[in-house]
Amino acid sequence: METMPNWLHKRAQMTPERVAIIENGTQVTYKELQKKSVEVANGLRAEGIDKGQHIGFFMQNSLEAAVCLHALMYIGAVIVPLNHRLTAAELSFQLDDAELTYVIADDELVGKTTDALNDSNVSLLVYQQVKPGSQDLSKLEVTIELDQLHTIMYTSGTTGKPKGVMLTYGNHWWSAISSSLNLGHDVHDRWLCAVPMFHMSGLSILLRSVIYGITMIIKPRFEPHVVNQSIQQEGVTIVSVVSAMLSRMLDDLGGASYPSTLRCVLLGGGPAPYPLLTTCERKGIPVFQTFGMTETASQLVTLSPEYMLLKQGSAGKALFPSEVLISDNDNVLSPGEHGEILVKGPTVTSGYWKRNEATHEALRNGWLHTGDIGYMDEDGFLFVLDRRKDLIISGGENVYPAEIESALLEHHAVKDAGVTGIQDEKWGEVPVAFVVKDELDLSSDALLAFLSERLASYKLPKWISFVDELPRNGANKLQRNRLNNTRETNR
């Protein structure tokens, strides 16, 4: 059983006066953050929260949310982040499935929990009503065990009910170390968090910041202008985004550029469109494309900026000390051959909460079967093509929605694009596209003509629907399973 000091506790001892968090111009040092977290931890214990309990975290990005998360770690509770964009029915399922004893919500979100908490034994605590306790450490966890369960984080649930991914302190620790060995870190780094803390992307920023001893700049939500302003004025060195977010940031940026202090734009959420990458290269924006998932505690593969265009479409190479291979029915494939992406390493989950069958299906012979399709080139770079469940088989040909989306986004008048498959009597399945356009006179015929110069005929969408917006989750990832429910404005 390997142990180490509680991360915030150790950090406050090492660098007490270093700035931990900036929110709306307010700066909090690690000493102050530790003090607040201990007081809240004792306050939560007085309310009945104890070590090992599963506690729902239902808060918006804020300093208070960061304090709450650290307080729960001091108690030794298992954190279950809850997406505040879910419906009452979706929340109710997760409350029951995770076997929660309490949900901690901030006062702005309390109303959203009412229906979900009906007919449940889960108690609600409003964070702002919790009275801070003392500085007494005697009942708190100042030491952690690396195999101790830290988080149960629910996946998006694109098919069936969401599954709770179990992640230990060790998973999060090795994720932070792996990222640091790849990106490096500097005591002057400032990591902007405009992605939700209830998602892996936001939670990992909080955990890595305290492990590295750097500053986390918190924004309540993603707003392109606010993020750009922070990069320009608050000394941001690292920011985590997905392609849709970065595209909106560049639209807002216009002809301006980012300062040289911005050294890393971590880009996740799937393959990046080529036009987006060329714009970033032209503007000198250091984009690190990544591949990872909740099951790997964030990024597992990363592509450095120098390969951004040379290896266009690649997610990069596996970080230390993880491994990646391509498999077809448990047979390892050669470079260039398409198959399922398998990953292995200390960041990989031990399984899904109360889902033994799903765990055994995903974790076999020490490898996590990701459900993603990809290939490795001769140089060992990973290329992620699509989710296996999103693959469209049309007339016996494999069609990858992400490839069509990337081609659509090359058109100057296409703001956003999503592709899915529908049943077809002749071909079995055919792709269809949903597009958010920038110009009113853009027609589907013009777009299809544009695509026909870039894609084989069997990859062309059967039809294109123009919509106001695409369905995306809290991490701004496209939800393809909801595309057919998207309101059509024109076809």
Image (cartoon, grey):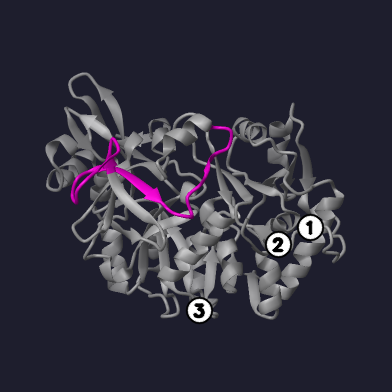
- Mark identifier at residue 106: none
Q: Tell me the residue at 62%/47% (across/down).
A: 81
Q: Is residue 46 visible?
A: yes
Q: Tag 3: residue type?
A: Asp
Query: Gap between marks 1 and 2, in whole Å?
Result: 15 Å
| Residue span colored magenta | 327-355
Q: Are marks 1 and 2 in contact (CB under 8 Å)?
A: no
Q: Which residue is mark 1?
A: 41
Asked which quadrant contains residue 276, the reply is: bottom left
Q: Please, which residue is most extreme toward the front here?
A: 1
Q: Is residue 345 magenta?
A: yes
Q: Quadrant of the C terminus?
A: top left
Q: Which residue is mark 3?
A: 186
Percent across and percent down for residue 245 are: 43, 57
Question: Residue 1 vs residue 475: left or right?
Answer: right
Q: Which residue is mark 2?
A: 143
Percent across and percent down for residue 90 are: 59, 33
Q: Are marks 3 and 2 in contact (CB under 8 Å)?
A: no
Mark 1 / mark 2, whichever is N-terminal: 1
Query: Gap between marks 3 and 2, in whole Å?
Result: 26 Å
Q: Is residue 21 above or below residue 53?
A: below
- In front: mark 3 or mark 2? 2
> What is the crowding at mark 2: few (fewer than 14 residues within 10 Å), some, or many (at least 20)?
some
SS at mark 1?
A: helix
